[in-house]
């Protein structure tokens, strides 16, 4: 059992990020058994859920010339255009059926504003609009975070780096994550996490 001030943050283990999903991360569902087994070791458990309106600006289909996996410039910076995924209320947006969700204390939904994407569990991609998770964790006295889930190089990376910037001590369980690995994004994610003192554990 970890100390009471340590939370397990489980990122986006949803159908669309697993095999057969709209934005399947290779081996996505392989993280589930370990994540399920670890949950009992934590006093605080957080789930995040990517949760987009069908009009979302990160969807390639909502841009005239946007191809999936191309990058465009948004007001808040570069944005990868994704296939339609994790649409609010759809089966793809549901947690994978094998993920144990009953132990969760809180579920943070993100990416619900049409005009802005949100990889991080803490801030949307403008790095300014908060999701509220920081306040939740602070009010519960949490200082340390252990993270796992999907995808290593997008939502896990930005959640871990934001958390470290906010002053949490962060460990990413890389073996309980899987990556999209788009144009070197996994190597970049590892370097970014290390540069922000995120511990990368197996
Ligand atoms: C994610 C791309 C788009 C993720 C979410 O969970 O890593 N990636 N939306
Ligand atoms: Zn998304």
Image: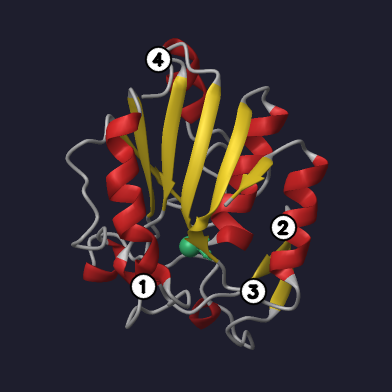
Q: Is residue 85 left or right of residue 102?
A: right
Residue to which mark 1 is pinned: 18
Most foreground residue, 132 or 190: 190
Is there any visible trace of residue 165 in the rendered image? yes
The residue singled out by tag 3 in the image is 181
Dot 3 or dot 4: first in sequence order is: 4
At horizontal 62% and vertical 42% (from top left) the residue drawn is: 160
At 47% from the left and 29% from the top, the residue drawn is: 133
Name the image quarter holding residue 29: bottom left
117 is higher (above) or lower (below) than 56: above
Q: CA distance from mark 3 to mark 2?
A: 9 Å
**Residues under labels 1 and 2: Cα distance?**
20 Å
Q: Secondary structure at mark 1?
A: loop
Q: Quadrant of residue 88?
A: bottom left
Neighbourhood count class around disc 1 (C-alpha, 10 Å): few under 14, some 14–19, many 20 upward: many
Specify whether residue 117 is in view.
no
Q: Residue at point 76% right, 36% down?
A: 197
- Disc tally is 4
Sooner in the amino-acid sequence: mark 4 or mark 2: 4
Between the C-alphas of marks 3 and 4, the distance is 34 Å
Instruction: In the rendered view, tell whether residue 57 sits above or below residue 132.
Output: below
């Amino acid at each position: 059992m970890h100390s009471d001030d340590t939370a397990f943050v489980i990122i986006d283990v949803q159908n669309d990020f697993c095999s057969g999903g709209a934005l399947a991360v290779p081996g996505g569902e392989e993280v589930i058994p370990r994540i399920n087994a670890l949950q009992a070791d934590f006093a605080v458990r957080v789930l995040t859920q990517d949760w987009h309106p069908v009009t979302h600006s990160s969807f390639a289909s909502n841009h005239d010339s946007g191809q999936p996996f191309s990058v465009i410039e948004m007001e808040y910076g570069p944005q990868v255009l994704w296939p339609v995924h994790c649409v609010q209320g759809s089966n793809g947006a549901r947690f994978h059926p094998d993920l144990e969700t009953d132990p969760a204390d809180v579920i943070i939904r993100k990416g619900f504003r049409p005009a802005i994407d949100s990889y991080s569990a803490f801030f949307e991609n403008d790095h300014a609009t908060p999701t509220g998770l920081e306040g939740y964790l602070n009010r519960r006295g949490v200082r340390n975070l252990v993270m796992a889930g999907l995808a290593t190089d997008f939502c896990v990376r930005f959640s871990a780096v934001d958390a470290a910037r906010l002053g949490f001590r962060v460990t990413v369980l890389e073996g309980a994550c899987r990556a999209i690995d788009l144009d070197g994004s996994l190597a970049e994610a590892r370097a970014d996490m290390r540069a922000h003192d995120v511990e990368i554990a197996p």
